[in-house]
Image: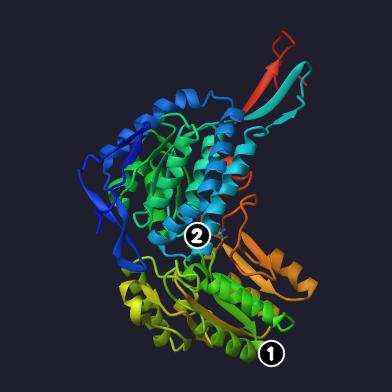
């Protein structure tokens, strides 16, 4: 077998090795004997070099007209389109999601790239009147400086694009530290940006692990803003680090997303949606449907049909076109899922499907887990409260719409929710009263589009939204300008 390819870091426009002199393996979770490459095990001196390069590059990038920045992003978007198939296949090899979904992930990066490229000719501020004569007022967006981006493994190209593209169009420079499980997709994105003409030092890429490379990035005094997507545990540590210097921070963390199925729902549609929401991406989305509250009038039928379909899902290597559910990202995540299945059993939830690791045939080579359904759950059980991040759905019977809402809102997270109903009154009440950042009607909890705000309430985040025009609010600062052309001193609030 040919030796694995060794991928380098990208710092100041050069491909460089880590100061540590060490590399780590990027495993294929569907077949652990296969490597998707080796990446640099970066440390704080690599991060310092990358932040220094980004600081240097900031001086001219911030002055580059935004439509020119946009042109580079348009070129990058076109290159990503040409490379979509190759990048999707590489993503499935490093992360496991089925090829069709990997294509969707690359597409999401393309969409974000074009969306933010277009912002280069907008980046609108406000002009307004003054309370004083011969005076003009406006607000404009200013860049912040160097942004540190720490990204997760579950959307290994889309989420880096969610962060890099708005940062760049606003005139910031970036250092990205992707998840150690999926550096290749971020590498492919960064390489494409370089080839599209992003100037040296504007985008820097440092592979490695959280404690060695992520922490020094969050701690670095010259990184003026940090954007993190990942676990609540790591998010809390990053928030504490950033608090010391009041660094700007966006956090996108856990979810315990619910689908509500009312008695008047189109059950065929709801079952189809629940399967996609719970088991798409092997349940490894922050937006995954992990709780399904079903009205008692249709609970038995829904449970029976949903379980049958869940049992029939084909689990396997995401490169096989017949596969519907790919592997779990790594062994430690697999153990977490196994632990939660144990917790569900102890809590006397009824295990209706799955519940175990799959090791038959080729599945023994990777980290596979059967699509799992717990029935007759109580909303207060830990499996209904805590994020599992795997193919596990818990069915909660409810007797009314009001009870469904109470169950829905009775968790610490608030990312996404959904309701299946044909009653317009219930749909509108749900849209108003579900305490989540995203609400779907007659669709599952996954499937956000890039031109709408993405993020959650409560402990899902810290109040920011990614994507859409709202992302610009994080990656820029408002600067307010007052221009007095009266040729005399005019005192606001006094000389009116
Ligand atoms: C995530 O769940 O981590 O809405 C991101 C979705 C995708 C993005 C999910 N477009 O499901």
Quarter the C terminus occupies: top right
Residue furthest to the top: 487
Kindly identify which residue carries mark 2: 102
Circle 1 Cα neighbour tier, 10 Å, few/some/many (<14 / 14–19 / ≥20): some
82 relative position to 154: left or right:
right
- Splitting the image into 4 quarters, where does residue 293 fall? bottom right
Circle 2 Cα neighbour tier, 10 Å, few/some/many (<14 / 14–19 / ≥20): many
Pick the front one: 393 or 293: 393
Disc 1 secondary structure class:
helix
Q: Nearest to the eye among marks 1 and 2: give it.
A: 2
Kindly identify which residue carries mark 1: 297
Disc 2 secondary structure class:
helix
Measuring from the top left, give residue 24's x and y in whole percent.
Answer: 26, 53
Instruction: Of the two numbered discs 1 and 2 on the same chain, state the one appearing first in sequence.
Output: 2
* Beta carbon at label 2 within 8 Å of ligand 1: no
Measuring from the top left, give residue 370's x and y in whole percent.
Answer: 43, 80
336 relative position to 161: left or right:
left
């Amino acid at each position: 077998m040919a030796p694995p390819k060794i991928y380098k870091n990208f710092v100041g426009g050069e491909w460089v090795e880590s100061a540590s002199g060490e590399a780590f393996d990027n495993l294929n979770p569907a077949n652990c004997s296969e490597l998707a490459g080796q990446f640099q095990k970066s440390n704080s001196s690599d991060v310092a070099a990358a932040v220094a390069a980004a600081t240097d590059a900031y001086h001219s990038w911030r002055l580059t007209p935004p439509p020119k920045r946009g042109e580079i992003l348009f070129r990058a978007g076109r290159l990503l389109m040409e490379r979509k198939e190759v990048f999707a296949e590489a993503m499935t090899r490093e992360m496991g999601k089925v090829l069709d979904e990997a294509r969707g992930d690359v597409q999401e990066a393309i969409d974000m790239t074009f969306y933010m490229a277009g912002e280069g000719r907008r980046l609108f501020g406000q002009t307004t009147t003054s309370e004083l004569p011969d005076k003009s007022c406006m607000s404009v967006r200013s860049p912040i400086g160097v942004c540190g981006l720490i990204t997760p493994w579950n959307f290994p190209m889309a989420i880096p694009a969610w962060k890099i593209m708005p940062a760049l169009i606003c005139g910031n420079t970036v250092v990205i530290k992707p998840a150690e499980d999926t550096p290749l997709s971020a590498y492919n994105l960064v390489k494409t940006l370089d080839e599209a003409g992003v100037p040296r030092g504007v985008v820097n890429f440092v592979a490695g692990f959280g404690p060695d490379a992520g922490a020094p990035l969050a701690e670095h005094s010259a990184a003026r803003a940090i954007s993190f997507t990942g676990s609540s545990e790591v998010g809390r540590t990053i928030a504490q680090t950033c608090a010391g210097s009041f660094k700007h921070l966006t956090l996108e963390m856990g979810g315990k997303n619910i689908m509500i199925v009312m008695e008047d729902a189109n059950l065929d549609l709801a079952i189809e949606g629940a399967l996609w929401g719970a088991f798409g991406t092997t349940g490894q989305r922050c937006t995954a449907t992990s709780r399904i509250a079903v009205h008692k009038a249709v609970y038995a039928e829904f449970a029976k049909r949903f379980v049958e379909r869940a049992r029939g899902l084909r689990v396997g290597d995401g490169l096989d076109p017949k596969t519907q559910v790919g592997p779990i990202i790594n062994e430690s995540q697999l153990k977490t899922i196994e632990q939660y299945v144990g917790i569900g059993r102890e809590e006397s939830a009824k295990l209706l499907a799955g519940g175990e690791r799959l090791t038959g045939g080729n599945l023994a080579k990777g980290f596979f887990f059967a699509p799992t359904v717990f029935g007759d759950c109580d909303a207060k059980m830990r499996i209904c409260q805590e994020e599992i991040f795997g193919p596990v759905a818990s069915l909660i019977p409810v007797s009314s719409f009001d009870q469904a809402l109470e169950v829905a809102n009775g968790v610490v997270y608030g990312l996404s929710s959904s309701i299946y109903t044909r009653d317009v009154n219930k749909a509108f009440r749900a849209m108003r009263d579900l305490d989540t950042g995203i609400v779907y009607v007659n669709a599952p909890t996954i499937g956000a589009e890039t031109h709408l705000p993405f993020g959650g309430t409560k402990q899902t985040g810290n109040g920011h939204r990614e994507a859409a025009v709202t992302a610009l609010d994080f990656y820029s600062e408002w600067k307010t300008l007052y221009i007095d052309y009266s040729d005399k001193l005019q005192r606001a609030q006094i000389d009116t």
